[in-house]
Amino acid sequence: MPIPYYRTPHRDFTLLLGDCRTLLKEFSFKFDMIFADPPYFLSNGGISVQAGKIVSVDKGEWDKGAERMETFNHEWIRLCREKLKDNGTIWISGTYHNIFSVANALTEHGFKILNVITWAKTNPPPNISCRYFTYSTEFIIWARKEPKKPHKFNYQLMRQLNDGKQMTDVWRLPAIAPWEKSCGKHPTQKPLALLTRIILASTNPGDWILDPFAGSSTTGIAATLTGRRFLGIDQVEEFVKMSKQRREELDSPQRMAEIRSKIKDIHQMETLALSPFVNEPAGSFELPF
């Protein structure tokens, strides 16, 4: 059994240090939802703009080796499928660099693709080459494990959060804000607004969520903010330490309330007198390690 790198006293937030392709083989627990932000394999010496500064896009060794993308995606998606409940769903983010490979792997491993969400960033970085349109979107594939097994979708809640209208597959949300970097910044960090909406859409309070490429655990922080439980895996200790620090921030009720107030969907739920929290369901279970 894996040995947790960090776990909260209530055992609702656990971090493992290591390669998910190894660690996922070491337990048989099944999850209600998986969110994965796998390597895009973009670290090739290029440059980009962040906060008005030109920066390298070399994110680390884990983001290099585009020639192995197909094999890599098939391997981790197959392992994740084994860790998903029959009515569970998986969300996978990407850009045009890797999202087609991900979609093919999902289909080949028996998933049914439900939507491809377009995340339209309201504050994208400029295109410094001035030879292309500014890149302002990323994609998130939403798929269920079994083609004929009904999946969870909190349709009415999504409609309420969209002013009483059906929510579309285009989400206009900002990239990460300065207040989300209080413990440092992961090079591919996703905003809490994005992960909160994903979790609210496809899970219930008390559900278990897995992130096999946890990074700084935005998925786990969003899970805690909405009353879900979380297991995150990452192979870079620096990022696992950052995840631990981010989770420990939420032990302060003041900080918890401050962060919740900044997330659009949670603020809207509170305006509508809705709550993402309920008591822990009867017969709930814990990770076996």
Image (tube, rainbow, N blue to C red):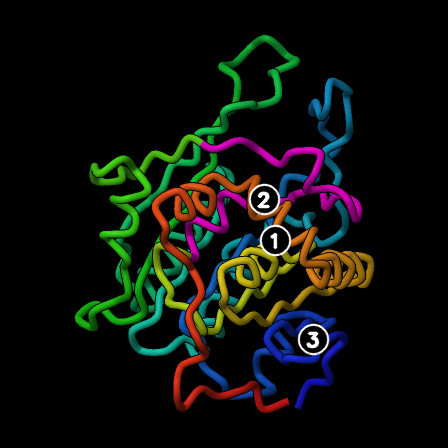
Q: How many marks?
A: 3
| Label 2 close to label 3 by CB (< 8 Å) | no
Magenta stretch: give its range. Answer: 173-199
- Name the amino acid, label 3: Thr
- Name the amino acid, label 1: Thr
From what the image shows, is residue 58 above or below residue 201? Answer: above
Q: Is residue 140 left or right of residue 174?
A: left
Q: Quadrant of residue 284?
A: bottom left
| Label 3 close to label 1 by CB (< 8 Å) | no
To which residue does mark 2 refer? 190
Which mark is in front, 3 or 1? Answer: 3
The 10 Å Cα crowd at callout 1, few under 14, some 14 to 19, many 20 or more, is many
To which residue does mark 1 refer? 218
Asked if one can make out residue 213 in the rendered structure from this viewpoint, the answer is yes
The 10 Å Cα crowd at callout 3, few under 14, some 14 to 19, many 20 or more, is few
Query: Which numbered circle lies on residue 8?
Result: 3
Dot 3 falls on a residue whose secondary structure is: loop
- Residue drawn at (28%, 55%) of the image: 113
Q: Position of residue 220 (x, y in %)?
A: 59, 61
Distance of mark 2 from mark 3, alpha carbons? 23 Å
Distance of mark 1 from mark 2, alpha carbons? 7 Å
| Label 1 close to label 2 by CB (< 8 Å) | yes
